[in-house]
Image: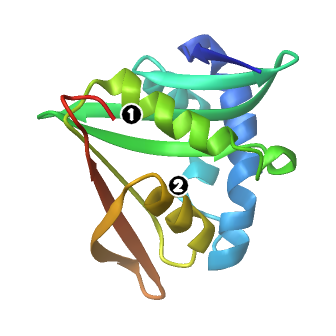
Amino acid sequence: MDERPLSPRDAGEVLTLQRAAYVSEAQVYGDPFLPPLTQTFADLERELSGPGIGIRDGGRLVGAVRWTVADGVAHIGRLMVAPDRQGRGIGTRLLRAAEAASGAAACELFTGHLSAGNVRLYEREGYAIVRRTTLREGVDLVHLRKECVSGRA
């Protein structure tokens, strides 16, 4: 498996991966209109002009992550792994790669409150829950943060 930066030309593959990866989240929350499932190709293409990393296996995109940096904090988002490749360390590898590539003093991310596997991954990697916010009735977002040593995760 190889790790490569993402670019706007990867938008079609990333959108396909994103929709496949977030179907299980939609089922957990009973909401087929989660933002990752309704994002347009054009919006995703614009997002991919910023930093992101993909992991390919035999040419197939099996994982991806994107982030932004503001005021020394990396905001990590859309960490996703193909459903048939989950549980093999790809998500951990992507998270670590995004932290390192961001060069930020701290990293923040969020996930849904029912996404226990995601919370376990983030806590195992040194993130701590800092707050919860309500997205809508029945759905809370769990916000996590990790301080980085010398601007490195």
Number of the front mark, 1 or 2: 1
Locate residue 152: give its quadrant: top left
Tag 1: residue type? Answer: Glu
Furthest residue in direction bottom, as rendered: 138
Task: Determine which of the numbered discs, if any, sits on residue 99 in the image.
Answer: 1
Residue 10 drawn at (x, y percent): 65, 18
Q: Quadrant of the N terminus?
A: top right
- Left or right of 63? Residue 83 is right
At 61% across and 33% down in the image, what residue appears? Answer: 64
At 62% across and 77% down in the image, what residue appears? Answer: 29
Mark 1–mark 2 distance (CA, rounded to whole Å): 23 Å
Please report whichever mark, 1 or 2, sits nearer to the chain's N-terminal start: 2
**Pointer 1: residues within 10 angstroms few (<14), some, or many (20+)?**
many
- Left or right of 48? Residue 18 is right
Tag 2: residue type? Answer: Pro
- Left or right of 128? Residue 149 is left
- Asked which colour scheme the image uses, the reply is rainbow
- Left or right of 16? Residue 54 is left
Residue 57 drawn at (x, y percent): 82, 23
Height in image: 33 above or below 27?
Answer: above
Q: Looking at the image, how many numbered discs can be counted on the residues?
A: 2
Q: Disc 2 marks which residue? A: 35
- Mark 2 secondary-structure assignment: helix
Residue 121 drawn at (x, y percent): 55, 58
Q: Contact (CB < 8 A) between labels 1 and 2?
A: no
Furthest residue in direction left, as rendered: 71
Q: Could you say which is closer to the camera, residue 5 or residue 13?
A: 5
